[in-house]
Image (tube, rainbow, N blue to C red):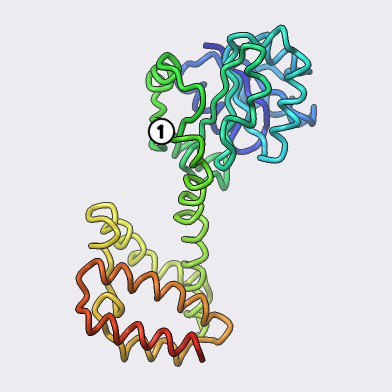
C-alpha cells in the first residue's frame, strides 16, 4: 500500500512518522504552500508532490490531513481527476465530519473513509510518541482489507455510525478540551493563595494522576470522591461563599452534574435533596 499525505500540519507529520516507522511506503506530501511541502518532504525524506494529479497517481491510500474547512477544497480539486480515482482509498482525519464530505468522489470509483485519532496533537513530537497507543475511529467504506492493513501496521480502530459522528467528536472534545478548562479553573484558585498556575500544576498533578488512574481502574462513578460525593453540604457552601461571582455558573453546572454521578454512586436521597437545594438556591441568587 502506497500512502500519500495531503497537509503538512501536526496530524499529517505525525502520521507520516508513524507510517515510516512501520515500513509503510509513505511516498510524500502535497499542500497549498510549496515551501512548507518541500520542507516537510525533506524532513521525512519523501517526495514533495507538485499537484493533486501526482498524489492520486502515485498512491493507493491518500490521507487528507487538513483542517476541517479545507476538506471541501481538496475534494473539489480531486474531482477534476475523475479517471484516476477508481479504487483509490481517500481518507480524511476530521473528527467531526463524516466520510460523506468525500462522497462526490465515490461516483468515480473511489473508496472514502474517515479515520480519526482519539489523541491530542498539540505538537508533532509528543503526538508521534502517543500514536502507538492511540485508538482511531473509522467510518465510511469500511472494508475488511483496509481494517486488516491498519491492524497489521498497529493502528487500532473501532467503527462508528456516520449519523453519530458529531456525538463521537463531542465526547472526545469534552474529555480533552473541557478537561483543560476544568483544570485551569482549579489552578486559578491557587492564585488566591499567592501562587501562580505553574506551581498549582506541580502541586496538583499527583491528585490529577491519581484521579485518572482511579477512572482507568474503576470507571467514573466509582472514581468520584469529594464533598459532593459524600453529601457534605457545609463544605460546598463554603466553596460557594469563597467563589468569585464570575465563575459561579461554571461551578454550579459542574456541581449539578457531579451530584448526579454521586446519586448513581448511592448518595443517600436526603443528602442528595439537601445538596440539590443548596445548588438551586445559589443558582437563583
Residue holding disc 1: 132
- Residue 171: % across, % down: 46, 51
100 left or right of 169?
right
- Please tell me whether residue 120 is drawn above or below residue 276 in the rendered image: above
Determine the residue positioned at 27% across, 75% down: 229
Residue shown at 51% from the left, 91% from the top: 285
The residue at the point 51 percent across, 39 percent down is: 163
Apparent side of residue 112 relative to residue 6 in the rendered image (left or right): left
Q: In terms of image quadrants, where is residue 146?
A: top left
* In the depicted structure, whether residue 187 falls above or below residue 162: below
The relative height of residue 109 versus residue 14 in the rendered view (above or below) is above
Residue 20 percent coordinates (x, y): 51, 21
Q: Quadrant of residue 158?
A: top left
Q: How many marks?
A: 1
**Badge 1, how many Cα within 10 Å: few under 14, some, many 20+?**
few
Q: Residue at x 43, y 72 (%)?
A: 254
> Relative to the observer, which residue lies in front, 69 or 31?
69
- Helix or strand or loop: what does disc 1 sit on? helix
Q: Position of residue 184 (x, y in %)?
A: 51, 69
Residue 205, x across and y down, in percent: 39, 64
Which one is in front, 73 or 131? 73
Amino acid at each position: 500500500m502506497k500512502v500519500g499525505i495531503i497537509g503538512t500540519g501536526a496530524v499529517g507529520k505525525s502520521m507520516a512518522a508513524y507510517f515510516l516507522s512501520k515500513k509503510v511506503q509513505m511516498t510524500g506530501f502535497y499542500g497549498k504552500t510549496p515551501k512548507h511541502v518541500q520542507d516537510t518532504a525533506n524532513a521525512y525524506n519523501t517526495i514533495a508532490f507538485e499537484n493533486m494529479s501526482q498524489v492520486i497517481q502515485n498512491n493507493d491510500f491518500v490521507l487528507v490531513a487538513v483542517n476541517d474547512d479545507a476538506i471541501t477544497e481538496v475534494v473539489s480539486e480531486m474531482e477534476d481527476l475523475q479517471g484516476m480515482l477508481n479504487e483509490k482509498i481517500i481518507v480524511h482525519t476530521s473528527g467531526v465530519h463524516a466520510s460523506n464530505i468525500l462522497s462526490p468522489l465515490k461516483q468515480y470509483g473511489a473508496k472514502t473513509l474517515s479515520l480519526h485519532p482519539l489523541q491530542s496533537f498539540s505538537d508533532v513530537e509528543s503526538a508521534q510518541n502517543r500514536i502507538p497507543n492511540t485508538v482511531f475511529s473509522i467510518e465510511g467504506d469500511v472494508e475488511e482489507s483496509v481494517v486488516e492493513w491498519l491492524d497489521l501496521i498497529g493502528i487500532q480502530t473501532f467503527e462508528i455510525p456516520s449519523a453519530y459522528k458529531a456525538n463521537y467528536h463531542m465526547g472526545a472534545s469534552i474529555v480533552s478540551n473541557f478537561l483543560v478548562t476544568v483544570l485551569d479553573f482549579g489552578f486559578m484558585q491557587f492564585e488566591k493563595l499567592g501562587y501562580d498556575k505553574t506551581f498549582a500544576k506541580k502541586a496538583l498533578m499527583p491528585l490529577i494522576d491519581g484521579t485518572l488512574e482511579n477512572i482507568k481502574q474503576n470507571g467514573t462513578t466509582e472514581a468520584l470522591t469529594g464533598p459532593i460525593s459524600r453529601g457534605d453540604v457545609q463544605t460546598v457552601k463554603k466553596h460557594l461563599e469563597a467563589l468569585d461571582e464570575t465563575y459561579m455558573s461554571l461551578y454550579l453546572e459542574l456541581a449539578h452534574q457531579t451530584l448526579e454521578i454521586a446519586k448513581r454512586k448511592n448518595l443517600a436521597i436526603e443528602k442528595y435533596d439537601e445538596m440539590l437545594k443548596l445548588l438551586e438556591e445559589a443558582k437563583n441568587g
